[in-house]
Image (cartoon, helix red, strand yellow):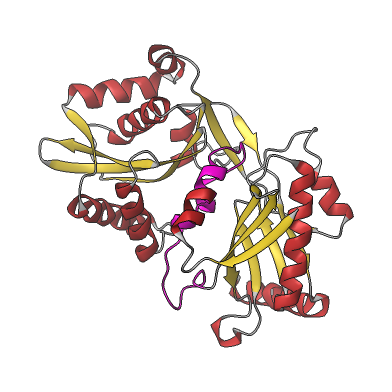
Amino acid sequence: MHFEFLKRQGLPPAIHREIEAFLDRQSNSHPFQYPNWTREQSGDEWADGYCAIVREQGEMRWFALCGVTFPGGTWLRTIRCLVVYRGPTCDDADVTLYGLGKLLEKSTELGFAYVEIAPDWIERPEWSVGSALSRDGWQLIPEHRTSLRLDLAAENDELLRSFRKATRYEIRRSEQHGVVIRFAQDEGDLLEFQRIYFEMARKKDFSAAEPSHLSHVLRWILSEKDRGALLLAFNQATLLGGTLVVRAAARSWYVVGATTKDDRLSAGHLLQWHAIRWAKEHGCADYDFGGYREGINTGPALFKRGFCQTVVHFAPVYRYPLKRRLCSILEFVNRARSKWRTP
C-alpha cells in the first residue's frame, strides 16, 4: 500500500473528485471530511491543512482530511497539532490502522506535538479499531458523542406516523397557516438565513458557527444540488427560518438551522420534515440529527426526539502524543486555564 500526504490548498480538481467518490462509497464518511467543507484562506487554522490518502494498486482505500491547530495559542504557533475531525474514513479496520500508523510517521517527521482523531465510527463489537488503538498507545479523550438517526426505509406516510403526536401537529399547523418551503436560490437567500441564524445565536446565547466558514459552506451547497440543500420557510413573503441538510454517501445530516420566534406556529418542524424527505429523494438510508444530549428534556434535544428515538453512540476522541513532555506541559496549562476561568 502507498501513503500520500498532500496540502489541501491547491488540490487538483481530479483529486477532489476522486476523494468525493471514495467518501460516497464508505459507510462512516461525514460531510466534514469533504475537502470543500473547509475554505482556502490565509491565516485560517485549516489553511495549512492536509489530505492523507492510502492507496492499494492505485485505488483509494483510506482518507483523512487533517487540520492544523495551535494548542498554545497563536502566539506559540511553533507548537502545532494535527486534527482529523469526523475521520478518518475507511470501512476496512486493517487499512484504517495502517493509515493511522503512516499518519503518525508523517506527523512525527513534520514536528507535530500530537495527532488527534474524532472519528464518525459507531461503537460496535465487530469494529476492533478502538481496542487496537488503545494497545498501540493512543489515549482516549473523555468526549463521547451521541446522535439520533432516523431510518428512512419506510414510506413517507409511515415515517410521518412514527413522529410524536406533538411533532405531527406542528407540521400540520404550519401547513395550515400557509407556510411554504423552498430551496435557497441565490446569495440574497443565504444572507437572509445567516441574518436569522446569528440573531438567534445572540438571543439564545449559543456558540455560533464562524461567519466566513458558514458562508463558505452555504455557497458550496448552493453550487452542488446533490450534496445538500438549504431549505427556507416562508409565510407569504416573510422568511421564518431555514435548515441546512448535507449528504455524505447514503446518509444525510442536519447541520444547522434557525427560525424566528413566532408563537402562532413552529416552522422548524416543517423544515425538518422537508429535509428528511430531501434525504429520501436523494437515496439516503438514514437521517442524522447532528448530535443529541441524552437525559435532556428541553430545547434542541426535545425537538429532535419528536422525530426519532434511535440513539447512536460514536467512538471517543483518540489522541497520540508525539512529543510526550510537551503534551504533558500543554495538558497542565489547559487545566490551569480551566481552573482560572471557573468562577
- Front residue of 164/4: it is 4
Residue at 40%, 64% (x, y): give it.
Answer: 210
- Residue at the outermost left position: 237
Image side of residue 150 versus residue 223, left or right = right
Find out whether residue 60 is within the magenta segment: no
Q: Which residues are magenta?
A: 19-47
Q: Position of residue 136 (x, y in %)?
A: 87, 57
Residue at 68%, 52% (x, y): give it.
Answer: 55
Q: Position of residue 307 (x, y in %)?
A: 45, 26
Name above or below for residue 152 compared with residue 128: above
Q: Quadrant of the C terminus?
A: bottom right
Residue at 66%, 73% (x, y): give it.
Answer: 339
Name above or below for residue 185 compared with residue 156: below
Find out whether residue 45 is within the magenta segment: yes
Image side of residue 207 versus residue 293, left or right = left
Q: Position of residue 124 (x, y in %)?
A: 75, 34
> Which of the 4 image quadrants contains residue 28?
top right
- Front residue of 52/244: it is 52
- Residue at the outermost bottom position: 75
Q: Main SS of the magenta segment?
A: loop
Q: Position of residue 185 (x, y in %)?
A: 21, 45
- Residue at the outermost front position: 57
Name above or below for residue 167 compared with residue 293: above
- Residue at the outermost right position: 135
* Figure disc tally: 0
Q: Is residue 141 visible?
A: no
Q: Is residue 257 visible?
A: yes
- Front residue of 186/329: it is 186
Name above or below for residue 187 compared with residue 335: above
